[in-house]
């Protein structure tokens, strides 16, 4: 175990937060998981147990290790649980104002040595770090979805991030069994700078009637060997997150090529956020996803 980082706090029990909690606890860290919603905390813990259970069934993990992993996780809605954390990873909804409030709250309770990281997909680490009383100890730690399966973590230094912090986070990433890449603090970093404009273009392709949902996804899967079609992937990421990232690219780089597709905006306005709400470019209410256009 990394000697400096023992207990880890995670904020947000959604698809990313529960995945981060899962990999940290499996790597023998005590984890405190916070959310504003008790329901989401319960759902997050259920997902972690389900995913660990799957590993047990495949003989990749023993039942005893699964039980020990779950026992290392505590949950709650109070920031007091962060008091003895060496690292707090923020993984709440992709909204800059919300993240700023959360980050200021973390600073009120954590000890001086605590590192604060954000799992933001796109927002400036320098701007978020400036909200803290410790910009040197603030860093971007961008996990990929689903966290237990994806190998990559992008690490992002804000302008003030110090080397000690960056090195500690790089070592922790390795200890979690992940591979890190360094990305500079530009809107959406590396993965989403490339991925999200492609997804947005797929939505334009649908919006302009060039192809149906099925035609677009089949084209990209069979024509370019992408494991998931771009619209299927958008539903998996969450359309609210996709739109938030496109807005950050559009505003941050001031280039019209990043303009979010109006159809993506409409879906988010309708609350059709993809898999997590049961409907996006596909309808997930039945046994198999059904294209909606
Ligand atoms: P999600 O919608 O699944 O979960 C967000 C969670 O944050 C919810 O449980 C919500 O209750 C909680 N939350 C909202 N406001 C809060 C507050 N004030 N305090 C505490 N908790 C609060 O979203 P997600 O997909 O897990 O995304 C979370 C973060 O991870 C975002 O910054 C997103 O950009 C980033 N991210 C997402 C992906 C992806 O593929 N979805 C990949 C990498 C990074």
Image (cartoon, rainbow, N blue to C red):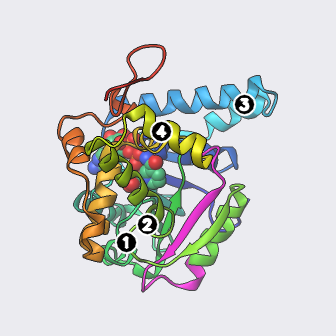
Looking at the image, is mark 3 or mark 4 nearer the viewer?
Answer: 4
Measured as percent of width and height from the top left, residue 20 is found at 55, 48
Q: CA distance from mark 3 to mark 2?
A: 32 Å
Which is more N-terminal, label 1 or label 4? 1
Q: Is residue 4 magenta?
A: no
Q: Quadrant of residue 62?
A: top right
Which residue, as the protein is rendered here, is positioned at the far front?
A: 210
Image quadrant containing the N terminus: bottom right
Per the image, the residue denoted by label 3 is: 55
Which is more N-terminal, label 2 or label 3? 3
Per the image, the residue denoted by label 2 is: 193
Measured as percent of width and height from the top left, residue 167 is found at 63, 77
User: Are there few (<14), some (14-19), or many (20+) residues within 10 Å of tag 2?
Assistant: some
Image quadrant containing the C terminus: top left
Looking at the image, is mark 3 or mark 2 nearer the viewer?
Answer: 2
In the rendered image, the vertical position of residue 287 relative to residue 250, given as above or below: above
Q: Secondary structure at mark 4?
A: helix
For image coordinates 63% across by 73% down, the residue present is 168
> Which residue is more in the foreground, 198 or 206?
206
User: Are there few (<14), some (14-19), or many (20+) residues within 10 Å of tag 3?
Assistant: some
Stretch in magenta: 147-165
Per the image, the residue denoted by label 1 is: 187
Q: Quadrant of residue 68?
A: top right
């Amino acid at each position: 175990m990394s000697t400096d980082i023992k207990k880890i706090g995670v904020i947000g029990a959604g698809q990313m937060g529960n995945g981060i909690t899962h990999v940290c606890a499996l790597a023998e860290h005590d984890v405190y998981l916070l959310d504003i919603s008790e329901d989401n905390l319960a759902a997050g813990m259920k997902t972690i147990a389900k995913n660990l259970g799957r590993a047990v069934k495949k003989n990749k993990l023993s039942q005893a290790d699964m039980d020990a992993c779950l026992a290392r996780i505590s949950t709650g809605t109070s920031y007091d649980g962060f008091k003895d954390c060496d690292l707090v990873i923020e993984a709440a909804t992709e909204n800059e104002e919300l993240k700023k409030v959360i980050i200021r709250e973390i600073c009120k309770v954590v000890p001086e040595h605590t590192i604060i990281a954000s799992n933001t997909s796109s927002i400036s680490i320098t701007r978020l770090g400036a909200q803290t009383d410790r910009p040197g100890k603030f860093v971007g730690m961008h996990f990929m979805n689903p966290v237990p399966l994806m190998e990559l973590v992008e690490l992002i230094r804000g302008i003030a991030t110090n080397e000690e912090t960056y090195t500690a986070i790089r070592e922790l990433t390795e200890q979690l069994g992940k591979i890190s890449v360094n990305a500079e603090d530009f809107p959406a970093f590396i993965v989403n700078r490339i991925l999200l404009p492609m997804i947005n273009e797929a939505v334009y392709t649908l919006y302009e009637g060039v192809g149906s949902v099925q035609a677009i996804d089949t084209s990209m899967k069979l024509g370019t060997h992408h494991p998931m079609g771009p619209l299927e992937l958008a539903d998996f990421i969450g359309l609210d997150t996709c739109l938030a990232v496109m807005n950050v690219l559009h505003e941050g780089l001031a280039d019209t090529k990043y303009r979010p597709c109006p159809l993506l905006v409409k879906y988010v306005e309708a609350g059709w956020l993809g898999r997590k709400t049961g409907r996006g470019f596909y309808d997930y209410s039945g046994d198999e996803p059904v294209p909606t256009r």
